[in-house]
Image (tube, rainbow, N blue to C red):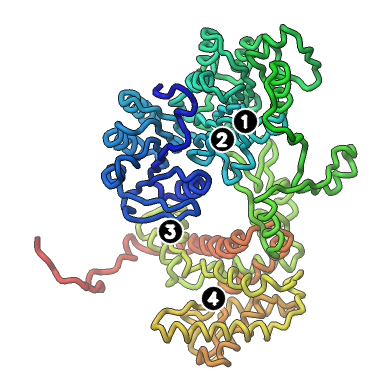
């Protein structure tokens, strides 16, 4: 390696340049890093040359290419460190350009990109080695030098000052997020961080742990190393062999993740965490570290006597079996070896549940497990408060959902939908009830709700053979396709203007009623006329303003219909069946009633010269929003799901209708009969010759 100590990889005064800097992740991280340490001198992104990224830490100029950055930047401001955020296919080209135009100044390249192919990674390593440039990654989250208050990449997130008080411990981790987690744990031991380094965990790690341990050995600020290790690769095996040969002089506390993956065939998510060979399993790595340390893994119930033998052992280090044991293990090592604390007032590590909702379970578990809610740290407390103030919907936390589902399960015997046995649903419920369960997570409240949902599916079946989606099925049959292809053709001809308008209607209705205190959409107690008049007046202002500016105005979704439009008062007969059924049951759907009052209010204030039809998309939106409303109020459903469901209901009904059109056309039609003859096609361009 070119670097001789950890600070050579990153220190105060380094000048950073970022590839693909206008990308979503790169721009966000660069802005946060600039606020922290202002070490980014520029970036490049194809087609974005000349742009400027404004940050609270200063502006970042954007160039079209790295070559342009070097050419237009003064030599004393040339970067010496590079961050690669480009997509996997572009990584090698970016690195080659950096080497070709920056080999005189570039010292280190950090490759943030994950899932870079083994071939590209190997070629990048060879290219940088020949140029004398260190390269870290791929799939690194970056690095932080806490004493110099500089970082590259997203290590530390946006709470770096809180997570990384300066200290004596260097963290080296396969996982970037675990650098942040371990830094927090160290504070419970009264220790701060000197460096936090994410090695990455793609199949090939370009700067492996053995090299980083050697840099830590040479670093005067590092008194102790904490390693986070995942299965896969021989990197730890090689590091242990090197430590044996050199007599590594600094203690190492190591946590090896992944034993649960061995038992349950669970993926850890990183491309390189794949077990291949005897030294690459989590169990094998644990055994090797224990053999090197010459002590069993740390346990909290064992009493460690501070003998000369223990001091000799802990000079090498110790393994922990759980992440939350790191503080006590580090404290044991430091106290035994006389390493002073970095932080005078250590934070004690304890459970701090942000939310507690044990329900009936609280009566059955031991009292000591029934914890009270703790304090939510910033910035999360602010975000939770904002979410709680929102009356409707929930923001779901994102996670890897591969081979995972809340909606369905199968234990090898019983397929289930949201916990209910599919066989029980088949025996006792209707298809419509099963759909409501699958789409909302709960069964319908009553037969009325179930009947309405079924009516929306029937209403969506067809509006005649001339509709775009019916044409899709007939075209597919005419071309000689199979039934499933015809149904795909039906689905493929739907969009925001055909079928998807119901989603916009839900968004519109939530904007109108989101701040109203509605518990039951069929018993709201609201003065719908007042709300409809207000919405109609807002529409009139919007329409007039757009007309004065010669612009298109934003229409109210689901009003009007190409067929039902010529009468003084227009109705969509399919919507009327649903509307009249609700009335026949002595109920009122506040959303659908609002639509009916709205079309009259728009006519009355002069915005329209007739009463528009409330079309079937509006009926679907109102019925399904009524079904979803309680889930939105209880924050068991996102607004996006509530918007998607009416479109899905339309698509399901129309796809079934498309199958009917296919069957009919396949029986009675002739091949290619949907083709439009050339004589009926209009030519709008003149013949030309080459």
Image quarter where the N terminus lies is top left
Cα distance between the residues tagged 1 and 2? 8 Å
Mark 1 and mark 2 in contact? Answer it, CB < 8 Å: yes
Q: Is residue 178 visible?
A: yes
Viewer-proximal residue, 536 or 42? Answer: 42
> Which of label 4 and label 3 is nearer to you?
4
Residue drawn at point x = 52 percent, y = 64 percent: 654
Cα distance between the residues tagged 4 and 3? 24 Å
Mark 4 and mark 1 in contact? Answer it, CB < 8 Å: no
Mark 3 and mark 1 in contact? Answer it, CB < 8 Å: no
Image quarter where the C terminus lies is bottom left
Element marked by disc 1:
strand
Cα distance between the residues tagged 3 and 1? 63 Å
Q: Which residue is mark 3?
A: 489
Q: Which residue is mark 1?
A: 167
Q: Which residue is mark 4?
A: 558
Viewer-proximal residue, 635 or 483? Answer: 635
For disc 1, the neighbor class at 10 Å (few under 14, some 14 to 19, many from 20) is many
Q: Earlier in the sequence, mark 4 or mark 1?
A: 1
Q: Which residue is mark 2?
A: 146
């Amino acid at each position: 390696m070119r670097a001789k100590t950890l600070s050579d990889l990153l220190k105060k005064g380094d000048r950073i340049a970022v590839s693909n800097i206008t990308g979503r992740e790169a721009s966000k991280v660069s802005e946060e890093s600039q606020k922290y340490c202002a070490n980014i001198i520029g970036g490049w992104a194809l087609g974005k040359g000349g742009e400027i990224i404004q940050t609270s830490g200063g502006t970042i100029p954007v160039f079209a290419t790295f070559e342009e950055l070097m050419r237009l930047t003064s030599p004393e401001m040339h970067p010496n460190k590079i961050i690669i955020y480009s997509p996997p296919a572009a990584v090698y080209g970016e690195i080659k350009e950096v080497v070709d135009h920056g080999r005189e100044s570039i010292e280190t390249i950090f490759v943030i990109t994950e899932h870079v192919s083994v071939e590209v990674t190997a070629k990048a390593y060879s290219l940088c080695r020949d140029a004398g440039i260190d390269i870290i990654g791929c799939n690194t989250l970056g690095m932080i030098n806490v004493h110099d208050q500089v970082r590259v990449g997203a290590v530390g997130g946006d709470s770096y000052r809180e997570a990384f008080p300066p200290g004596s411990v260097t963290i080296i981790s396969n996982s970037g997020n675990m650098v942040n987690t371990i830094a927090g744990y160290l504070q419970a031991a009264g220790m701060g961080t000197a460096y936090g380094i994410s090695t990455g965990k793609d199949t090939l790690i370009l700067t492996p742990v053995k090299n980083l341990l050697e840099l830590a050995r040479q670093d005067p600020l590092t008194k102790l190393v904490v390693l986070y290790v995942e299965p896969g690769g021989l990197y730890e095996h090689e590091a242990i062999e090197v430590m044996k040969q050199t007599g590594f002089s600094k203690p190492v506390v190591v946590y090896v993740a992944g034993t649960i993956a061995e038992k349950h065939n669970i993926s850890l998510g990183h491309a390189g965490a794949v077990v291949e060979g005897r030294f690459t399993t989590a169990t094998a790595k644990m055994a090797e570290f224990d053999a090197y340390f010459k002590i069993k893994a740390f346990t909290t119930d064992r009493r460690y006597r501070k003998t000369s033998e223990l001091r000799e052992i802990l000079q090498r280090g110790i393994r922990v079996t759980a992440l939350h044991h790191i503080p006590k293990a580090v404290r044991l090592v430091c106290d035994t070896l006389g390493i002073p604390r970095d932080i005078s007032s250590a934070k004690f590590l304890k459970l701090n549940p942000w939310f507690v909702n044990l329900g009936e379970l609280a009566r059955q578990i031991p009292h000591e497990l029934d914890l009270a809610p703790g304090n939510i740290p910033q910035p999360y407390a602010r975000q939770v408060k904002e979410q709680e103030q929102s009356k409707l919907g929930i923001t779901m936390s994102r996670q890897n959902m591969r081979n995972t589902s809340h909606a369905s399960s199968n234990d090898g015997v019983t397929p289930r939908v949201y916990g209910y046995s599919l066989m029980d649903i088949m025996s006792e419920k209707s298809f419509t009830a099963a759909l409501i369960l699958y789409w909302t997570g709960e069964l319908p409240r009553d037969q009325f709700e179930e009947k309405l949902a079924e009516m929306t599916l029937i209403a969506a079946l067809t509006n005649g053979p001339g509709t775009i989606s019916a044409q899709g099925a007939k075209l597919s049959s005419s071309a000689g396709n199979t039934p499933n292809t015809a149904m795909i053709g039906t689905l493929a001809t739907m969009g925001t203007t055909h079928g998807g308008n119901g989603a916009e209607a839900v968004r519109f209705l939530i904007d109108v009623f989101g701040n109203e205190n509605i518990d039951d959409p069929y018993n709201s107690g609201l003065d719908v006329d007042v709300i409809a008049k207000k919405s109609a007046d807002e529409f009139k202002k919007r329409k007039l303003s757009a007309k004065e500016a010669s612009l298109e105005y934003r229409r109210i979704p689901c009003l009007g219909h190409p067929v039902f439009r010529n009468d003084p008062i227009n109705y969509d007969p399919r919507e009327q069946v649903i509307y009249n059924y609700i009335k026949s049951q002595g109920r009122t759907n506040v959303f659908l009633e609002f639509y009916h009052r709205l079309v009259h209010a728009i006519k009355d204030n002069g915005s329209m010269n007739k009463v528009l039809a409330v079309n079937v998309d509006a009926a679907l939106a109102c019925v399904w929003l009524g079904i979803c409303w309680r889930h939105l109020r209880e924050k068991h459903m996102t607004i996006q799901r509530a918007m998607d469901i009416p479109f899905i209901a339309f698509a399901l009904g129309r796809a079934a209708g498309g199958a009917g059109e296919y069957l009919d056309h396949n029986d009675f039609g002739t091949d290619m009969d949907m083709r439009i003859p050339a004589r009926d096609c209009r030519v709008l361009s003149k013949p030309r010759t080459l």
